[in-house]
Amino acid sequence: MVRVLNFFVALLVVAAVPSPPPSSSPAEPATAAVVCVLSCDTLDPSRAAQETFPVPEKRINGRRLVLHVSDRDGMAWGSIDNGVAGDSVWLDRSWDGGATWEGLLGRASIPGTWTGTRTLMYNVTDPGHHRRGLIRACGDAAAVTCTDWIYPTVCDVLCDRTGAGQANGDVQPVPPTTLFGRVIRLHTDLNAMAWASIEAGGPGDEVWLDRSWDSGVSWPGGSSLGRTATPAGASSVRTTMFATRDPRGRHYGGAVRACGREAGHQQGSCTAWARPVPTRARAAADALMYSYDPSTAWWPTSWWNSATTLTAVMDSGIRDYDWVIARTFDVNRGSFAAGQRSTDPIEGNFISRSIDDSAWWGLTWVAAYDRTGDQRYLAMATTIAAYVHQYWDTRTCGGGVWWDRERTYKNAVTNGQYLRLTASIHRRTPGDTTWLQRARTAADWYLGSGLVNSAGLVNDGLNGDCRNNGQTVWTYNQGLAIGGLAEVWRATGDARYLDTAKRLADSAIASPVLTRAGVLTESCDVGSNSCDDNQKQFKGIFMRYLNDLAAVTNSVSYQRFARHQSDSVWANDRDALNRIGQRWAGGTPNQLDWRTQASGLNAVIG
């Protein structure tokens, strides 16, 4: 949509990051909200994972003023040395490119007999609130001086202000806008770089980029980037390129738009906001990571959904996101009262009265172990699996795991998870026989349970007579059965299990219950229906395990089906910010949030 701007707004220019004037007066109070990413502000520097010095130190009347940075922690601290009692050091932190700042952060004064001191550590970045920060160290030793700001330039594969001649491709993700006959275009490339151009104009016409870290809601520090005027004798010009991802700052999926001004009028016009598409998986994952809260270390406000969403992030294969694994584990392994993470209390080790919720986290930590090789994740998955196993009960229906601690229901989701989890623990535990026997017993029970109906589809569960209850066929139940049986086959080599997994996959692909025109379609996707927060992620879980089966069998039909899902999602269910909705074939009413995004990510991985 064309946006016409007031000239004075359109001419907002981001000033170059200023050489620091005297910082906030030492007498002024510091008023800064605490920022938490991997750690919270005021971490002691003795706990820093590294120490670098990315800007030159400064001298104040013979004192050394130094800015210390740990990129691994995303934090910085300042120090002053060769001083006397009363000399002080602090940090300034800016969220708008250095135009304004929070001053006096961690201010420390040299005590009586010392010659130096240092501040505590503060976060340079705030991805949870979509703010890109700058930090500098300042000191007062009978005069106030500051270091340069760190990281004013954003760098990804390439850095800000790289010439557009180095672009890796040229995609125009949104329609151009026009202004008095001029055409203003937004360009992006496969490195997630962006630039703007203005065409069919004349000398003095101007073009620039705006960059936003919060999906175009605001763009402090990102206005008028690369502002360029059309030179005499020319009718077009383009800006240099700017990055839309800031891996160092843990910002992903920055949005950009192209803006321009015709020389003879006091007006400007901008394209719509867009995010680049380096690959489908990265674009979808970047948009998903936008919703991750690094402070609380989950995707608020759904507990089990966060588990399978973290697994989807790992499924993407993108190493930039690996820090999220440990962060989520460390923050959430403890206990939480009801209402903090789930309607149920979380009792520690990701366990609650909901057996299926606990099992989702068990599967997540198996994936984390596979991703990192860190034994603590396998240990946690085993702990969770042992908890789930407590609810395997042969006294009702001859076996099967209960859905909840109250033992009210034996259903497909919990037993599909149990298949996958027991076989996974066995395959990753040297010398194990216990989990192997449990996996085999569970698979044999599943095959004879009646959960699979005559059409080869998995109904929701069993009734009080231990018969198929005929309730809704959901894609994730089908997917869990496929993934569970495929993993039991890996564990045992018994072809019955793989044959059944393939039969379930073939039935799903051919079924009008689960697909329409070859696209996965949940019953809540049809007509005027809408899906609840649980159902929003079902199709992605199916695709995770169908992709696993495709890898096992090298089946062309499964690969073709997966590609069809990806193509439909990308063409019909994605906006210019790479956000993916619930209805993979498109249409209305549609729903869009991080849950549908995680599900869609699994659709486009391949």
Image: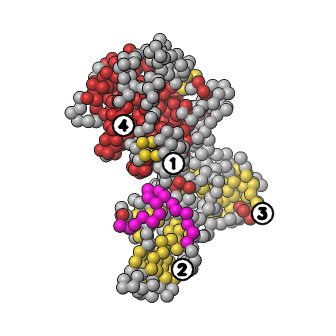
Label 1 crowd bin: few (<14), some (14–19), many (20+), radius 10 Å: many
Measured Cα–Cα span from mark 3 to mark 1: 41 Å
Q: Residues within 10 Å of mark 2 (few under 14, many from 20)?
A: some
Dot 4: within a 10 Å radius of its alpha carbon, few (fewer than 14), some, or many (20 or more) residues? many
Whichever of labels 1 and 4 marks the residue nearer the N terminus, that label is: 1
Residue carrying label 1: 292
Given this view, does label 3 or label 1 mark the residue nearer the observer?
1
* Tag 3: amino acid: Gln
The secondary element bearing badge 2 is classed as loop
Upstream in sequence: badge 3 or badge 4: 3
Task: Please state if 184 lies on the left or on the right of 84 as rendered.
Answer: right
Task: Decide whether residue 38 is among the magenta residues.
Answer: yes
Tell me if 259 is positioned left or right of 128 in this view: right
Q: Nearer the viewer, mark 3 or mark 2?
A: 2
- Asked where in the image residue 427 lies, by quadrant, the reply is top left
Q: How far separated are the C-alphas under marks 1 and 4?
A: 24 Å
Q: Residue furthest left?
A: 431
Magenta-tinted stretch: 30-46
Residue plotted at (67% across, 49% down): 272
Q: Which residue is mark 3?
A: 266
Question: Of 367 and 421, which appears nearest the observer?
Answer: 421
Q: Which residue is mark 4?
A: 384
Instruction: State which mark lies toward you, 1 or 4.
Output: 4
Residue lying at 42% horizontally and 81% vertically, measured from the top left? 110
Amino acid bearing label 1:
Tyr
Q: Residue 299 appears at what percent x and percent y?
A: 51, 45
Numbered mark located on residue 26 in the image: 2
* Colour convention of the picture: secondary structure
- Evaluate if marks 3 and 4 touch, with contact meaning CB atoms under 8 Å apart: no
What residue sits 63% from the left and 25% below the top? 526
User: Regarding mark 1 in the picture, which secondary structure is present there?
Assistant: loop
